[in-house]
Amino acid sequence: MHPSARLGVTAAAAATLLAAMALPGAAAPAPHDDERRVLVFSKTAGFRHDSIPDGIAAVEELGSQNGFAVDATEDAATFNDTDLARYDAVVFLSTTGDVLDSGQQDAFERYIADGGGYVGVHAAADTEYDWPFYGGLAGAYFDSHPAIQPATVRVEDRAHPATAHLDGAWNRTDEWYNYRTNPRERAHVLATLDESTYSGGNMNGDHPLSWCQEYQGGRAFYTGAGHTKESYAQPAFRTHLLGGIRYATGAAQADCRPEQGYRPLFDGTSTDGWKQAGPGSFTLGDDGTLTSSGGMGLLWYEAKEFGAYSLKLDWKMTGDDNSGIFVGFPPSDDPWTAVDNGYEIQIDATDAPDRTTGSVYTFQAADIAARDAALNPPGSWNTYEIRVQGERLQIWLNGSKINDFTNTDPARSLRQGHIGIQNHGADDEVSYRNIRVKELPDTPAGGTRGKGGK
């Protein structure tokens, strides 16, 4: 069954997990992708990688460990409407050359349009050069590669399930592909190659290695890693691959819209420009996260007030925790100033509809069905986009729009103000990463209602 048919299952699982974690002494169940099924396709019509058997075995083991079924084939006849409908995602594992005929290509296009998932691994980019749909789905075609060597991978998105486990720098050895085009305009880049750390990169310093996107009705994830047999025994790479599969099948949610033009307000290394108001604090961890303790207080960005902007940040709860993001408030060392003169975008997922994740706290509930479909459970990272233009406040959760609010209270004008993150209380532990902002042109309330994105 395709991911588009599983939104209710995802929401129910999230609600069950929240309820379980709210019980005293209850242990959090491990993530489990019940009833999902993945097809590994490894047909080659060109160079054949000797790591393919290791890759198949790794995906099978990941499926066994994480509750999804795996079938493997090199039979292109499987690409028909009936057989493809059995799978939530298809993994193109180092395929090369022209591996599908025109009828099989048509069936796969229908599968993606119906909500199917695609995972491309390494030489999947060296496949089907004359099929434009596939080139768009994969994101970029292979151009060339230097010799196998060590390099540093720079992780751009540390909330996506394929990269959330990684540090900002990931050092590993592989065969590093150059690509004919840069996918950044069309896809959301998760990680890039630092061309200064190895020889043979030819993408002028912006060298995406892994990316994701929503594509013509389906979900797509690609990683250029995975040439070597050793890759499939490495825990970090296996988790990277697992996260891509979980995104493609719909078991995990992520914001995979293209993202450009943002600058960091908190990059994981320093809180310069930020100031704590009220009791409690945030602790800066070695993994580049800010984690709340005590309160009720507010860590606010003192260095600048913002008018029209898109704010993006990643957040994670450990259980039934409480926090929020405040916007549009004047400078103050009293956290209640933000409460009384700004707006809070709530995180706690277990309260009343106008006080739960995605709500403009006490003013407007989120679209609860859309919120439930987009929300990852406690222990997983989520991404907010909070867009302020004029008096209009829009909220996206993991790439899905869940709220659209217009301010009519002059005491709470959104046209100018500060940004802050709340530390709610002694029993609340919420972590934040990668707080970034892009300033936008001011648009009056009731102006163009866009989709959001770059």
Image: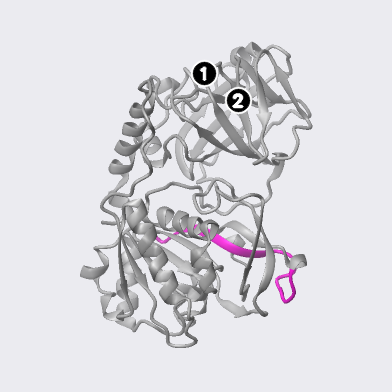
Question: Residue 64, relative to residue 180: is it above or below?
Answer: above
Would you say 221 lies left or right of 390 here?
Answer: left
Would residue 54 appear left or right of 311 to someone viewing this image? left
Residue 364: percent from left, percent from top: 45, 23
At a point 59% along the width and 57% down the height, the residue shown is: 189
Q: Secondary structure at mark 1?
A: loop
- Residue in the foreground of this view, choosing between 301 and 66: 66
User: Horizontal and vertical percent for residue 195?
Assistant: 73, 67
- Extreme bottom residue here? 46
Image quarter for residue 57?
A: bottom left
Res. 68 in view: yes
Q: Amino acid at mark 2?
A: Ser
Question: Would you identify the image quadrant in which residue 385 lies?
Answer: top right
* Residue highlighted by disc 2: 292
**60 is higher (above) or lower (below) than 347:** below
Residue to which mark 1 is pinned: 427
Which label's residue is closer to the chain start, 1 or 2? Answer: 2
Q: Are marks 1 and 2 in contact (CB under 8 Å)?
A: no
Is residue 446 visible in the rendered image? The answer is no
Query: Which element is circle 2 on?
Result: strand
How far from the left and from the top, in percent, is residue 205? 74, 65
- Circle 1: residue type: Asp
- Where does the magenta region start and end? 198-216
Marker disc for residue 447: none
Residue at 38% across, 44% down: 31
Q: Residue furthest left?
A: 82
Residue 107, horizontal then vertical, whole percent: 29, 73
Q: How many marks?
A: 2
